[in-house]
Amino acid sequence: MQIGLTQELKVARETVHGFYLEDENGHEVLLPGVYIPEGLKPGDMIRVFLYKDSESRIVATTEKPAFELGEFAVLKVKEVGKFGAFVDWGLSKDLLVPFAEQNAILQAGELYPFCLCYDQKSDRLFGSVKINKHLEFTDVQLEVGQEVQVLIAEKHELGIFAIIEQRYSGLIFHSDIHKQIKTGELRKAFVKQVRDDGKVDLLLEPMGYEQSVDEHSDILIKALEANQGKLKLSDKSAPESIKTALGLSKKAFKKAIGKLYKAGKVEIDVDEIRLK
């Protein structure tokens, strides 16, 4: 039985401490009584996560951890102790991040990206902040324009570092960020470029989106300038009114307004837009 993974096991027998579960090879593990769902009985199958409790015994739990072996998650540090930092990963026992697996001393209360790792010698799970050690940088199986799922990991001097499909290193440059994104969130992104070093540049919108938004923003700016800095249009306006005034669809109009507003170039009222 491999700790750090969710497995489907069979309920073998009941004891005063809980149910013993077994795998297809007859290996057993205890599911403590506190985790037993109502109605569970011997012979049933149940999905559980395996880890070691505070007494270093392998146990099963129905609690769902933030990540599993080899996966990445953004977690908050609860405290820093003698042997490293402890983070909340969704289980009753906090996860240890040894000092040797930290790039710098972690701070309590702060969020960091971690990888869940296994030490075969000690038969223990641990967290690591040395993310690049656990990502793939050769034979990156991604294509330009491909839609991917990313974990927004942390801020970088050049932009936002993201983990792609739990496998690859990605970066969203500051110049390509036109919407609010939050550390720790999972979202879709698009491959802008796969570099020779195996790192990947990302976009938050499909390829060609920025160019079209820029063109539509120019149309809107010119229309505002031609009307003394005001247009009797808003995101509540009828699509026909927008089409007549600007030649844009309502969707393109709203995207252009959003970009100009974030850039501080326009003000938006209930029924009009104004140049700043």
Image (spheres, rainbow, N blue to C red):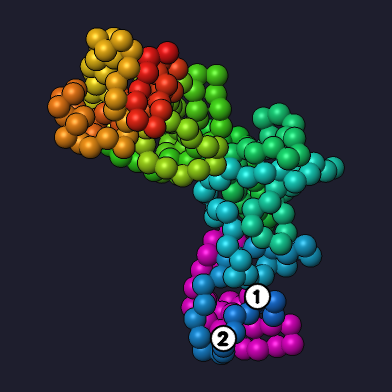
- Element type where label 2 sits in the image: loop
Q: Amino acid at mark 1?
A: Tyr
With respect to residue 103, does 96 lie above or below? below
> Which of the marked residues, 1 or 2, is nearer the chain's N terminus?
1
Residue bearing mark 1: 35
Q: Where residue 26 sits: x, y (%)?
A: 55, 80
Residue bearing mark 2: 40
Q: Where residue 242 sits: x, y (%)?
A: 21, 29
Q: Residue at x 58, y 77 (%)?
A: 27
Whole-number angstrom distance, CA of label 1 to CA of label 2: 11 Å
Per the rendered image, the range of residues in magenta is 1-29
Q: Quadrant of the C terminus?
A: top left
Q: Residue at x 73, y 67 (%)?
A: 57
Q: Which of 238 and 102 lies nearest the eye of the viewer?
A: 238
> Would you say 186 lies left or right of 18 here?
left
Check the image and name the residue furthest to the right.
Answer: 82
Residue 15 magenta: yes
Q: Where residue 107 sits: x, y (%)?
A: 75, 35
